Image (tube, rainbow, N blue to C red):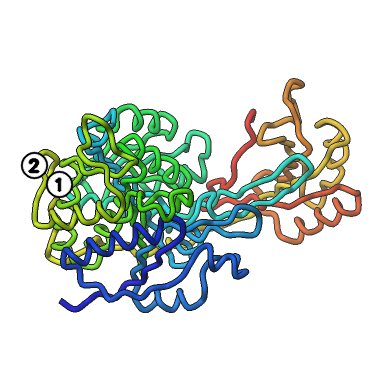
Amino acid sequence: MAATPITVAHGDGIGPEIMDASLRILQAAGAELDIETVEIGEAVYNRGNTAGIEASVWDSLRRTRVFYKAPITTPQGGGFKSLNVTVRKSLGLFANVRPCVSYHPFVETKHPNMDVVVVRENEEDLYAGIEHRQTDEVVQCLKLISRPGSERIARYAFEYARANGRKKVTCFTKDNIMKLTDGLFHKVFDEVAADYPEIENEHWIIDIGAAKLADTPGAFDVVVMPNLYGDVLSDVGAQIAGSVGLAGSANIGEHCAMFEAIHGSAPRRAGQDVANPSGLLLGGVMMLVHIGQAAAAEQVHNAWLRTLEEGIHTYDIFAEGVSRQKVGTSAFADAVIARLGQKPETLPAVSYNKDGKGIAVPPAVRSAPKAKQTVGVDLFVHWAEGGPQQLADKVQPLGGNGLKLSMITNRGVKVWPEGLPETFCTDHWRCRFLAETDGAAVDHGQIAALQVRAAESGVDFIKTEHLCTFDGEPGFSLGQGQ
């Protein structure tokens, strides 16, 4: 077999130690890897590069299309970007796959039969990172959910389930509150599910779904979620399975894929030869499957399971009465290598498809455009000089030229007309102007003229949001209380 080119970053903190151990195990199992080593993370940040990654690394990734990355340290404080987020979004790594598996009775857990895979959307949602301070009292973060992004991650979750013999895919959202953003994610999930009739599908509201996952993870198989929920619950899932330190992660895109541990760089443990390489190693197993070296992946995974059940443990999972030997990073790697070719006797052995076919990566698909019509505008205002009625008195005269003030909200709650006196108001207001004639179209000139009138009247408007319908369906939320 020809060696597969991969890009390797040894990372920060414990990264170099666990990467050395992991690569040693993978190669001892027969993995054919042509390694390009790159530098990312703390040293690059310290040279003044706020992204933590040099341009040459992108060139390497374009060549190899595979990134095996140890944990890195992102400096605290403003101006430094999360390198993980930068890589995922820049390379279009839309799917984050995190298996959460328990290893009872060798690793302590309350859920001995847990085997859940969290598939997390990786590129959008609140992780778009678009934030603004708009008034003295209010900041905002934009939650962006797209139809192509939702369809791609939902379809990948079903393709993963099909390729790995999984029986059910569950979607978690909060679409009872965020009816447009999470509502779109849920709607697209249902549409995609119809293309996989052999796989059971269901939807849970995220709060009760998270509670159920923490309490009864056996109720789930593959769980697909928007970015923020998936980030939180994949860590929760890994921890309740036994340890975040045992979890690997795959980040899959159309042009490239990245494999890593889900834990951080643990700088306090650096250089002590005590860190557990298991999370990064299992990320490496996922990498081998991805590049078509499933035989080596199977060897490594089964040898690792055999090592675990023989009680040879690093300090983080060592437990008196269960563990037999406490070992460091290098010695743990030696123990796994010594067991290559063996299978676990208590834990279930793993088997990977060796026909070389990976999971189909769905392309981004754009739907046909709908008939779009602008019917009004929300004018967001910074105001601290009185209550809702005083603001209405100031902005209502801005109407005219086909527009009229229909509503004022504060943090999404309608406060005018007919607001409740008990509602607490900040200095951030939404003033909704609709067409004077119900259902009539509003053009950009009318909106621009409204902004000019607001400026001339001394109204401190922060931004506007156009109110549009798509094939007659409102593309905007109503205020709570309407």
Give the image location of residue 200, x and y in percent: 23, 40
Left or right: residue 248 versus residue 73 is left
Q: Specify the amino acid type for callout 1.
A: Arg
Q: CA distance from mark 2 to mark 1?
A: 7 Å
Mark 1 crowdedness (10 Å alpha carbons): few <14, some 14-19, many ≥20: many
* Above or below 103: residue 292: below
Give the image location of residue 326, x and y in percent: 26, 42
Q: Quadrant location of residue 361?
A: bottom left
* Above or below 168: residue 350: below
Which tag, 2 or 1, sits closer to the chain's start? 1
Camera-side residue of 187 and 370:
187
* Above or below 1: residue 405: above
Q: Residue furthest top?
A: 422
Left or right: residue 270 versus residue 469 is left
Left or right: residue 195 versus residue 173 is left
Residue for point 20% across, 38% down: 324
Regarding residue 117, the answer to whether it shows in the image is: yes
Residue 306 image label = 1
The residue wearing badge 2 is 345
Q: Quadrant location of residue 363?
A: bottom left
Residue for point 46% across, 64% down: 87
* Above or below 214: residue 51: below
Camera-side residue of 5 and 318:
318
Q: Residue furthest right?
A: 457
Q: Secondary structure at mark 2?
A: loop
Camera-side residue of 161 and 457:
161
Q: Quadrant location of residue 128?
A: bottom right
Q: Secondary structure at mark 1?
A: helix
Name the quadrant of the N terminus. Answer: bottom left
Marks 2/1 in contact by CB < 8 Å: the verdict is yes
